[in-house]
Image (spheres, rainbow, N blue to C red):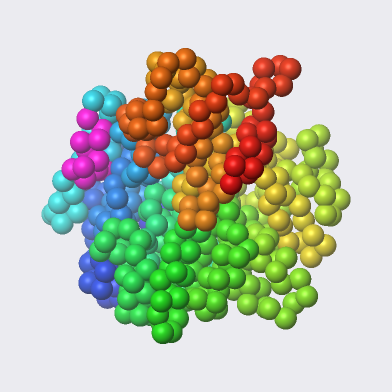
Amino acid sequence: MNLAHWLERAAAVFADRPAIASGRTTVCSHRDLAARAARGAGWLHEQGLMPGDRVGFFLGNQPDYLQLLWSTWWAGLVAVPINAKLHGREAAYILSDCAATMCFVNASHADALTGHVPGACRLIDDHRFLEGTTAPPAIVPREEDDDAWLFYTSGTTGHPKGVRLTMRNLRWMTMAYLVEVQPVAPGDAMLHPAPLSHGSGLYHLPYVLNGGVNVLPESGGFDGAEIAALAAHWGNASLFAAPTMVRRLAEWARTQPAPPAGLATVVYGGGPMYLADIEQACEALGPHLAQIYGQGECPMTITVLPKHVIEDRAHPRHRERLASVGYPQPMVELSIRAPDGTVVPVGEAGEVCVRGEVVMKGYWNQPHATEEALRDGWLHTGDIGRLDADGFLTLLDRDKDLIISGGSNVYPREVEEALLRHPAVAEVSVIGAPDAEWGEIVVAYVVTHAPVGENELDGHCLEHIARFKRPRRYRFVEALPKNHYGKVLKTELREQERSAH
């Protein structure tokens, strides 16, 4: 089933209710959104796009984003949302890898792509066709296993991989939200201070399905006072937030005489949230926090720590549960496995494996990576964790060296490869270090064979990778610790970093 049938249904059932808002101003109703999506689909057909073609979205959060997204699905196309913070070269790689026919941009992102975008991909920065007179076509039929969303996640090779999320995946992810995270009634609001290219964008689906309103802050980013004001205005408002955002919202709330009004659920995920931060956020924001754990490969839907568990302070293991990521969501099976694939006993550590209707179809044009990740019917997440006797999962480490800073993924090899392009850098190893503000920050241990300063390396990084991926701290060393096989011992570097702080 094509997801666009949800919007068609919403246009009939919730016709005049607000569907998209910018701040406190309604942009369109559900009837209007469906009409614009259909006109956009007609325009896409006129441009020669065929069902299954990929369409990029290199945009910041703005009302057009959601309208164009539904046009893409209405036309039977595959959406490829791209992190708006990426360097133009990085965004162009994604467009090239998936052979995108078209990419929706605004002026600033069009400039960023100049000189990098593949020639076969058209950049569209004028979205007025959504208001045009193109005859709206019928929704293009799609099968359950047809691609709907191509989510690019960084890979250990230094190049991002395209996670193939199908109509089925997104439908079951939506049901998981409604069942375990937050039920949605007509008129309920989802606030979007987090990027629509990631979890926040996925979480707009339940609000279209059930007649809610998706609200884009006018600031285009995250501001505690703005979020509180929007929650009070729209009422029963939820949002998806990286731990950094939760901490900032809690810090703002502590300066106010009372907790924010109008909040339903603040869903946090996408990075490590320390126990002390969770407790402080609960104190400042009230009984509104819920946690999810997922990956792009199993979007937003591996485990959940719902509000009622977080607020159950009388439970004898309350703090232990707060430090976990909750229990499996009902759409998945979860298993902790040893490297040989055997299930480990309760309480022992192993790789988190999951299977169910929300697990990805595979990686775009990467059969070997797909085969490695999807083995014996299970998604091998690469995360290390343990289950307790009650089924609560605690994450211990990441098998890969992923760094999550401010809710954004940073893979060390991407940063290392960028730094190694500088002629003064002989060797480099990048690790993550705990940080109270960002969850983790990027730290680079650098061996040089010519004089070079931090400012020069910082500028060099900005020429090659996104700003949020650059190191926040440089350590200039004479040599990197290595084992007998010449492999850098990152565990030793992490210990050095802990000792230094």
Does residue 284 appear in this view? yes
Q: Residue sitting at 19 percent across and 54 percent down?
A: 130
Q: Is residue 226 above or below residue 171?
A: below
- The quadrant in which residue 215 appears is bottom left
Q: Is residue 342 above or below residue 434?
A: above
Answer with the quarter of the image where residue 277 lies.
bottom right
Is 105 magenta? The answer is: yes
Classify residue 309 as left or right of residue 448.
right
Which stretch is magenta? 104-114
Q: Nearer the viewer, residue 473 or 219?
A: 473
- Whether residue 37 sits left or right of residue 349 in the image: it is left
Q: Compared to 364, does 27 lie above or below?
A: below
Number of numbered discs overlaid on the protein picture: 0
Task: Report the residue at 37% width, 37% height from top.
Answer: 466
Residue 206 in view: no
Picture residue at 65% right of the left edge, 59% below the top: 325
Is residue 357 magenta-colored? no
Relative placement, left or right, of 90 versus 137 is right
Q: Residue 331 in the image: state x and y as whole percent.
A: 64, 58
Quick check: 45 above or below 198? above
The residue that appears at 26% across and 61% down in the rendered structure is: 219
Residue 366 location (% of width, % of height): 54, 28
Q: Assign the magenta stretch its main secondary structure.
A: helix
